[in-house]
Amino acid sequence: MSEKLEQAAFLILLALVTGVFLWLLKPFFAPLLWACIIAVLFHPMQLWLEQRWGQRPNTTALTTLFACVVLVVIPVLLLLFSFLQQGLSVFEQIQAGELQPGKYIDQVRNAFPVLQGLLERFDIDMSTVRDRAASAAVAASQFLARNALAVGQGTFGFVLKLALMLYVAYFLLRDGRKLVEQLVHAIPLGDERERLLFQKFAEVARATVKGNLLVALVQGMLGGLIFWILGLPAALLWGVVMTVLSLIPAVGAGLVWLPAAIYLYAVGDWIAATVLIAYGVLIIGLADNILRPLLVGRDTKLPDWMVLLSTLGGIAMAGINGFVVGPLIAVLFVAFWQIFSREFNPQRETPAEATEKSD
């Protein structure tokens, strides 16, 4: 009896200490998440270096991390600061009256009276749409301006989190395999189940970041390029906006380039508008359909509707980091239920399992 009581007390204290420790790490959620993702993404490179240099964990981990900084971290930082700088410039132009978002809505309304009549049939007032669009543009520019100032004022905190991410990523690259084995040994879920769950984490992190983020970057770059070629203002700003929107499945960069094309039609620039629509459909749109299957493949094994809902839910829960967190939670949810179904209903085979076996 006393032994069971001691064991129960120990498990309660273990859960309590673990919860307090996780709460302690809560402010560093984003750096730790991206350190894990870096370790997963660049693990193949580390293995490649180990095959050529032998077992030199410190050297291979440091070289891999240096490659990550050069290839990923520095370009992203340069893009982020340029984006915030342009956002601050747009805010200043709106404040000075040089940019009037409501004016563009009025031009579209005057150029397409048929559209206004169609919207009125659905009780949609263009004046209300105009006011809300103008308010949204001002609010968005204010948000960018505040974040630009926050980055400037909170440089120390930003640099600290960046350094923490790289520091943790180094140790995960060097000792990650040992850590995984220790977790497999310590967690009482069964080694096979735990290895499956770690495999799912690696697959979805690799597929989401390598696929979705790279596809979004390509679409944003293509969108910013055509905006620059056509002489549209703030091409870099809109390119980054298209990158962010492209992270959300079934939404994409069309929310930016399509209204821009409609505005170009409204002001009479038919050639530029037609070029922008053709480019958006044939180049930006097809980039998603061609690159995503090649880069992501079927790693996540999630239906499209679940990818969409988990991505939106993840962004609502964890901000921009949610485009990784959401699908990760969804994949772990599916993995747990697949394990439960296989072990507690072994006589029945689900259609999904039959499809996986046939593949």
Image (spheres, rainbow, N blue to C red):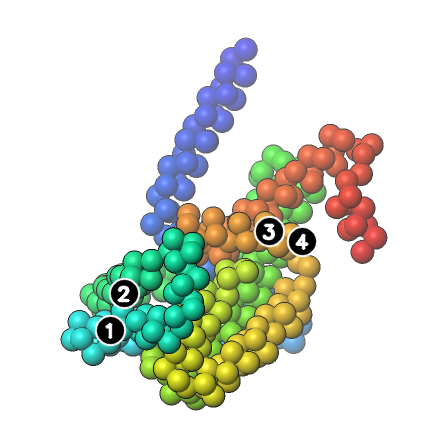
Which badge, 1 or 3, is on the more N-terminal residue? 1
Is label 4 in contact with label 1 (beta carbons under 8 Å)? no
Of residues 201 and 220, the one drawn nearer to the viewer in this rendering: 220
Q: Is residue 139 left or right of residue 345?
A: left
- In the rendered image, residue 292, in percent from the top left (x then y), is placed at 62, 68
Other-residue count near label 4 (Cα within 10 Å), few / some / many at <14 / 14–19 / ≥20: some
Q: Secondary structure at mark 4?
A: loop
The quarter of the picture where the C terminus appears is bottom right
Q: Which residue is mark 4?
A: 301
Residues at marks 1 and 3, CA–CA distance in whole angstroms: 38 Å
Q: Which residue is mark 2?
A: 134
Q: Is residue 338 left or right of residue 161?
A: right
Of residues 321 and 92, the one drawn nearer to the viewer in this rendering: 92
Is label 2 in contact with label 4 (beta carbons under 8 Å)? no
Residues at marks 2 and 3, CA–CA distance in whole angstroms: 32 Å
Of residues 189 and 124, the one drawn nearer to the viewer in this rendering: 124
Q: Amino acid at mark 3?
A: Trp
Q: Which residue is mark 1?
A: 100
**Residue ID at (43%, 37%):** 18
Which badge, 1 or 2, is on the more N-terminal residue? 1
- In the rendered image, residue 274, in percent from the top left (x then y), is placed at 50, 83
Which badge, 2 or 3, is on the more N-terminal residue? 2
Q: Is residue 6 left or right of residue 116?
A: right
Q: Amino acid at mark 1?
A: Gln
Is label 1 in contact with label 2 (beta carbons under 8 Å)? yes
